[in-house]
Amino acid sequence: MARILLYTGKGGVGKTSVAASTASMLAKQNKKTIVMSTDPAHSLGDSLQADIKPEPTKISDNLYAQEVNINDAIQSHWSDLREYLTALFQYQGLDPISADEIAILPGFEEATYLLYINDYIKNNAYDVIVVDSAPTGEALRMLSFPEVMRWYMEKVFPISRTAAKIARPLMRPFTGMPMPNDKVFKNAEGLYDDLGEIHNIMQNPDITSIRLVTNADQMSFNETKRAFTYLMLYGYPVDSIIANKIYPEKTGDFFEKWRGTQSIILGELDSSFPEIKIFKSYLQNNELIGQDRVLKFGQDLYGDQDPYSVFYKGKPVEFIRENGKTAVKIKMPFADKKNLNLFNKSGELVVEVNNWKRILYLPQTMANLQPSGAELRNGYLYITLS
Ligand SMILES: Nc1ncnc2c1ncn2[C@@H]1O[C@H](COP(=O)(O)OP(=O)(O)OP(=O)(O)O)[C@@H](O)[C@H]1O
Ligand SMILES: [Mg+2]
């Protein structure tokens, strides 16, 4: 099974540079590697100084790169479904413009990238898929979409998947509600299954490592803690953090205060993420451009470590038994009680941190349980079910 390494973090911290350098290193190890940009503002081509196409483009031995054209991709994956949803919302009384707008769910577009990754995994096309992702917010929308789609399929799609074939001829004359035609239905079902598969793969710490790129300043550090929290909430395995653009000693007096700030933040990173590997990389004396410089940057960054390794394997979300009760345990060292919301809605457990919400589908055997208490303890959120 291939490895998926996804780099995200605050804007401008060095995601693209780190992703490109990681991919270059892995290709040098004779691993067939693709680095794929899922940031609509692509800059992979600038970093690697190559003409990267919307399709996988070979740029050197074992190294492929891709800058997906999101509009084409949406056209080929989602257009039927979107048309159908528009019709459905129109039927429900929305005017055509808002119906069209609402037919784009949050993450709908970004999730298209996941379909590419799923294809590569299914076809065993690469040994490593390196994802140069968009800044945190967009990356999270993409990663949270498979569950949004599941909710949608079960709630808003007018009929459950298996019942559709039987129900369609009966329902239409009856209610006048637009029913998906065979093509749309197959399309939706296929997308739903593919998203389900890639969702599992990307939550598997043996295959996927999410890596947070940051800079050693307060704002980047704060964003890193928030991003980590949301990634844990959604169940994605983070195995390392890359603290980039650290000022070397020789930057002189002008940067003295900065070096002080950075050293404090680096200390806080170490103590805040005790299990997670922290890599440090220094500000270079010039922009990181071109394959040779990018490769060298990666070699300095990882030192004697292999970027292919899994640096930490903890599971963000677990179902456990404790004191005779079943509980959901979510790693959440930085969560604050006042930003946390829990509610239970017709069998779904909804956990909300700031504005990021996860609908937790309980395993079949626990489906009838209700949340009976919640507490933050030792960096974990425990939700007891009874
Ligand atoms: N360690 C470094 N030393 C010097 N320059 C760096 C370093 N890391 C990144 N850069 C430069 O900083 C700029 C931003 O880096 P990069 O594009 O990799 O960040 P990004 O996080 O992908 O940004 P965006 O959020 O816009 O996608 C680039 O010009 C890059 O060459
Ligand atoms: Mg970038």
Image (cartoon, rainbow, N blue to C red):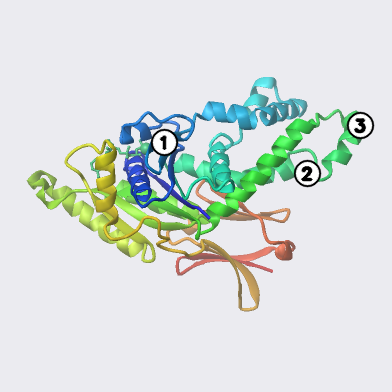
Q: Nearer the viewer, residue 217 or 68?
A: 68
The first of marks 2 and 3 along the sequence is 2
Q: Nearer the viewer, residue 345 or 125?
A: 125
Are there few (<14), some (14-19), or many (20+) residues within 10 Å of tag 1? Answer: some
The image quadrant where one finds ligand 2 is top left
Please indicate, yes or no, whether residue 264 appears anywhere in the rendered image.
yes
Q: Quick one: which residue is furthest to the bottom in this view?
A: 323
- Residue flagged by tag 3: what amino acid is it? Phe
Are there few (<14), some (14-19), or many (20+) residues within 10 Å of tag 2? Answer: some
Q: Which numbered mark, 2 or 3, is in the foreground of this view?
A: 2
Residue under numbered circle 1: 58
Q: Which numbered mark, 2 or 1, is in the foreground of this view?
A: 1
Residue under numbered circle 3: 174
Residue under numbered circle 2: 161
Expressed as whole percent of the image width and height from the top left, the position of residue 316 reads 51, 61
- Residue flagged by tag 1: what amino acid is it? Lys
Which residue is at 54% across, 26% downward?
71
Lateral position of residue 363 relative to residue 280, left or right: right
